[in-house]
Amino acid sequence: MRRALCWAATLAYAVLIFWLSSEPDPLPALTERLWDKGIHFAEYGTLGALLLASLRASGVAPRRALVVAALLASLYGASDEVHQAFVPQRDADVRDWAADTLGGAAGAGLAALALRVAGSRASIRRTR
């Protein structure tokens, strides 16, 4: 059940990214105030974290899950940039993809760290 919920959240978030990328000017109030690359970093950081959690819930080993989550986030970012090339008033930008990739890796790394800390605390509680 946990695995299905993790993957459902990851898929829903990927759909949200696709939908926002389909819009000519999504969230204009946000993009006027924040740095575009920072938005990409945060957006794909969240995706990287969700992917890591989903992979771990599916039984993928910690290091492999980290690498795969970062790679999948980067590939999704690349596909998103290609998608935006076909959306009016949008364009594909390799710098956006770089921010997506860095964000995905950072998000996966932070999620891996959080899961490791949570696992350590749970094992400490069991030994008491």
Image: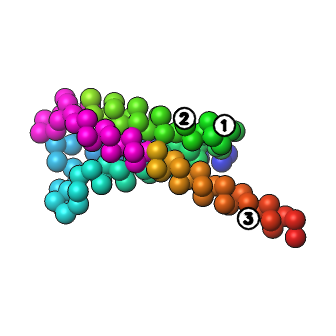
Give whichever of discs 2 and 3 has the lower sequence position. Answer: 2
Amino acid tagged 1: Val
Q: Earlier in the sequence, mark 3 or mark 1?
A: 1
Confirm or deny contact between disc 1 and disc 2 (CB under 8 A).
yes
- Residue 126, image quadrant: bottom right
Q: Assign a secondary structure to mark 1.
A: loop
Q: CA distance from mark 1 to mark 2?
A: 9 Å
- Is residue 9 found left or right of 102 in the rendered image? right
For the N terminus, give its image quadrant.
top right
Where does the magenta region start and end?
83-104
- Location of mark 1 (residue): 60
Residue 4 is labelled as: none
* Disc 2 residue type (three-letter): Val
Relative to 66, is 110 above or below?
below
Q: How many numbered dots are placed on residues in this image? A: 3
Q: Which residue is mark 3?
A: 121
Q: Which residue is mark 2?
A: 68
User: What residue is drawn where x is 68% and y is 38%?
Assistant: 61
Residue at 30% in and 54% down: 38
